[in-house]
Image (spheres, helix red, strand yellow):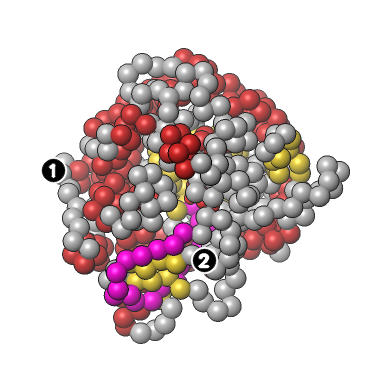
Amino acid sequence: RVQKLPRDFVWGGATAAYQVEGSTQVDGKGKTMWDDYLEKQGRFSPDPASDFYNRYPEDIGLAKKYGLNAVRVSIAWTRIFPEGYGQVNQKGVEYYHKLFKECLDNGIEPYVSLHHFDSPKTLFDNGDWLNRKNIDYFVDYAKFCFNEFKEVKNWFTINELISLAYSQYIAGTFPPNHHFDVTSAIQAEHNELVAHARVVNLYKELGLPGRIGLIHVIQPVYSISTSIEDKHAAKLQDAFLNKFLLDGTFLGYYSDDTMASINEILQLNDARLDIQDGDLAILAKAASQNDIFGLNYYQNQFIKAYHGESENHFNGTGDKGTSSFKFKGVGETVKKPGVPTTDWDWNIFPQGLYDTLKRISHDYPNCKTIYVTENGLGYKDKFVSPDKIIDDTPRIDFIDQHVAALLKARSEGVNVQGYFVWSLQDQFSWANGYNKRYGLFYVDFKTQKRYVKKSALWFKELADTMNKE
Ligand code: BGP
């Protein structure tokens, strides 16, 4: 068990605008790529989600009461620019000023992302990140936010570039639901990296006093066996999921080793990547200018070689054992006996967090200060009665093991300064809906009442150890 947190450790809870705010159609908000899609799909609605648009004072109050000193929130691009560009929506601007004030008045530091999976519909319809014009619009939006929200001192450009590209174009679980469209996936990642880098360069040119970075989710990939074939599969999958993006962010170029793997994947899948003149200079300039890195970590992957046609099944319902993923010429994800999994088939593997922290600090000296910006357990929490604390012991065990892995890496010199649990309160999950809960606080989505879970009490206990000798 973790006994004590380091002095001045950032101890936070994470949210994302579209997953908590609700109020998707009010006060001038523009549509995102999700609104019509979810309505048509008919499985679940993003309204009212956790009604954070109205109930943020209550949730920030809970955060404070249970010892948190930071929250991650994102700005909904379409509250600021309903069309993605052009006319500013003043009501959206006011909302975020109020939210940040509420945080700061309560001693909670807001860590703010500009893009968390919620592309404006107008831009999405024109190709989203595959359209280079999107990069310009994103830079304009970022510039507006930097000038407007001076109270924010910690910025992240984009959340989880791989998850967005992968879910949109490989797994097919986010709109526009392409399957194994490798060209689009790799191109979207590259274009998002350029967008991130341009925003970082702009932030530094403006001489702003805060810190800026981006967030990657890392899924470390382990070969299931010692065979040369399986090890090669793991190397390819790692390049595709992790190394391409880490190189682009912190080296400012894609190393020969990375490109050898990426080119092999592209060739096998009849795909290509277009790097335009000037892109690499932009990446190179930004690489050493990131102040902070947000690492999201949930799980690792075990891989074995696979040469058949690509196919996958996504477990978005919590029916254990139903997921599968086979990527032509790359590999197939497999389970490893002895490694527990969640109901959604995610491995529970804290060692992967330790390995990832060590790897990044070793391989990427430009990555100076790390925060674990998401980690947590999707779980079917059971509500018993209003006066009973909800028992989520498996979540406490999960967080405890991961914080221990973080502190071990830190004790060995990795500069990791904080931990944000996913998530602050129960919220909407993109491809899973509402039965996959992550919060420290239970939300009854019908009444919007909040109830404390055992994990919140545990969080508070550890918070109290922070600044004691
Ligand atoms: C990350 C995202 C979050 C969040 C979380 C849990 O990839 O940044 O937005 O949803 O994963 O994932 P899920 O909701 O699919 O269980």
Inter-mark Cα distance, 1 to 2: 44 Å
| Residue appearing at x 34%, y 76% in the figure | 305
Q: In the rendered structure, which disc, 1 or 2, sits on the residue that comes first in sequence? A: 1
> In the rendered view, would you say 190 is above or below 100?
below
Q: Residue 399: horizontal and vertical position, in percent? A: 64, 57
Q: Does 7 appear in magenta? A: no
| Residue appearing at x 42%, y 82% in the figure | 225
In this view, the residue farthest toward the right is: 387
Q: Secondary structure at mark 2?
A: loop
- The kind of residue on which mark 2 rests is Thr
Question: 243 or 187, which is in the foreground?
Answer: 187
In this view, the residue farthest toward the left is: 277
| Residue appearing at x 73%, y 38% in the figure | 450
Q: Is label 1's Cβ within 8 Å of ligand 1? A: no
Q: Is residue 70 left or right of residue 460?
A: left
Q: Residue 10: horizontal and vertical position, in percent? A: 60, 44
> In the rendered view, would you say 115 is above or below 249?
above
- The kind of residue on which mark 1 rests is Asp
Q: Residue 83: horizontal and vertical position, in percent? A: 36, 23
10 Å crowding of disc 2: few (<14), some (14-19), many (20+): some
Which residue position is annotated with label 2? 322
Disc number lying in front (1 or 2): 2
What are the residue bounds of the magenta stretch?
A: 296-314
Q: Residue 377: horizontal and vertical position, in percent? A: 61, 56
Quadrant in which the N terminus appears: bottom right
10 Å crowding of disc 1: few (<14), some (14-19), many (20+): few
Question: Do we see residue 73 in this rendering?
Answer: no
Question: Do we see residue 390 in this rendering?
Answer: yes
Q: Secondary structure at mark 1?
A: loop
Question: 464 or 247, which is in the foreground?
Answer: 247
Q: Is residue 176 left or right of residue 402?
A: left
Which residue position is annotated with label 1? 277
